[in-house]
Amino acid sequence: MPSGRTRVRRLPELAVYERDAIYAILDEALVCHLGFVDEGRPYVIPTLHARVGDELLIHGSAAGRAMRVLGSGAPVCVTVTLLDGVVLARSVYESGVNYRSVVVLGNARAIEEPAEKLRALEAFTEGIIPGHWVLARKPNEQEVKATVVLAIPLEECSAKVSEGPPDDSDGPDADLPIWAGAIPLEMVARDPVPDPALKHDLSPPLYATGYRRSHRRA
Amino acid sequence: MPSGRTRVRRLPELAVYERDAIYAILDEALVCHLGFVDEGRPYVIPTLHARVGDELLIHGSAAGRAMRVLGSGAPVCVTVTLLDGVVLARSVYESGVNYRSVVVLGNARAIEEPAEKLRALEAFTEGIIPGHWVLARKPNEQEVKATVVLAIPLEECSAKVSEGPPDDSDGPDADLPIWAGAIPLEMVARDPVPDPALKHDLSPPLYATGYRRSHRRA
């Protein structure tokens, strides 16, 4: 799966190329960062993504720059990062963060056939808010038209995983009387907050009260 | 502050151009996504950042591609995203996420003068783990040499903020008997975990037990 372009060159000991591990990171993350080139300059925008099989789906407005550039097949880089902790090493140099990240390189394919597009939007919604597609009002024809759905093949991709305590416990700094360890960081979901404009006496659905990302791994 | 390139074109009602609001987002976020172009293709890598005055500092290995490309003054896009919640609208189309994001465009300047570089590394460390610079072993000459420190001027930048309940409470969907609201998401820090290899009986410092990002706003 790693190409010459996705093979991890910096800190190769952190590299992960197993498909299951890469997919688990993509599935846990809600937001990705989409990189593209327009008139020779780089742009990075945050957007939602969902993995469906061996493709990554993203969507956006047909009126936006990203979808215009990428819908035409321009090269794309999608990067997903889960922040797992702050690492306090004995030295400043070895301090940093624990994280899991994935970089996907490729070219997007616009999904244009209406039935396929609607299925992609359903799969996308299931990836973001599992359960919501069934309950919510489905997109109408106009909404489907206004949305560009892109599929990026998960061919050229790699992950980097940094975890655990700092790396300076067996070097010359090991004896320093400086506390070292990690501060775990976790993204948690709080209780759902109803829209104050709700006109019906409804309880939040189970997929809202039980919403979580961290154990979603397929 | 917004240029033709950073003026928010999609969903302009979410745009924020006030410097204080933009800086608060940059300061709360620990990780940014760095976009650059190499041989005509886009690359996006996650990295730590710290704002110091009207500049954004990033650092990396002198041996890495990103620092090589950006240290030479190539155009850069730095994007920071804080995920605040999942929005469940009555319709799939209006559902999505609440977030605060900043996009910075510009060209980086490599900080090369050793004393300025050391001051930049101190400010950088203060931004990531306030308090750690004083306690930890400071970078030695070799470590300073192996690190590229880049400063990106915060001139061309803009923010986008999406918050609160979904937007479909005054449209044709308002009467639908579908629960709508938001699920707040929050990044929380857990209790520090000591390195099992610690050779001294030390308690974690206060800046570790009290670590938090969300109220760091300057």
Image (tube, coloured by chain):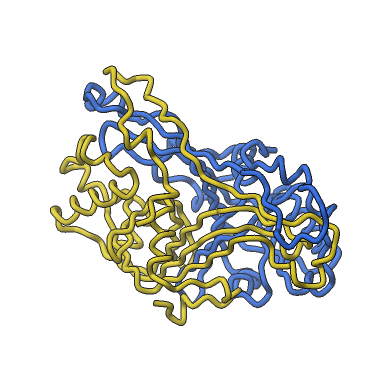
Chain colours: A yellow, B blue
Q: Position of residue A94 (x, y in %)?
A: 72, 65
- Residue A182 visible to an observer of this rendering: yes
Q: Is residue B52 left or right of residue A66?
A: right
User: In the rendered view, would you say A85 is above or below B186?
Assistant: below
Apparent side of residue B192 relative to residue B39 in the rendered image (left or right): right
Q: Quadrant of residue B174?
A: top left
- Residue A38 in view (yes/no): no
Residue in view at x 77 percent, y 72 percent:
A171
Depth check: B144 or B178 in front? B178
Picture quarter with the N terminus of chain B? top right
| Residue depicted at x 38% and y 63% | A23
Vertical position of residue A61 compared to residue A138: above or below:
below
Q: Position of residue A97 (x, y in %)?
A: 63, 57
Which residue is found at the position 46% from the left and 78% from the top?
Answer: A5
In the picture, residue A92 is in which quadrant? bottom right
Residue B64 drawn at (x, y percent):
62, 75
Q: Nearer the viewer, residue B198 or A94?
A: B198
* Vertical placement of residue A134 versus B90, above or below: below
* Quarter of the image with the C terminus of chain B in it: top right
Total tally of numbered discs in the picture: 0
Between B175 and A101, the one lying in front of the other is A101
From the viewer's side, name the closer residue of A94 and B57: A94
Q: Position of residue B159 (x, y in %)?
A: 53, 43
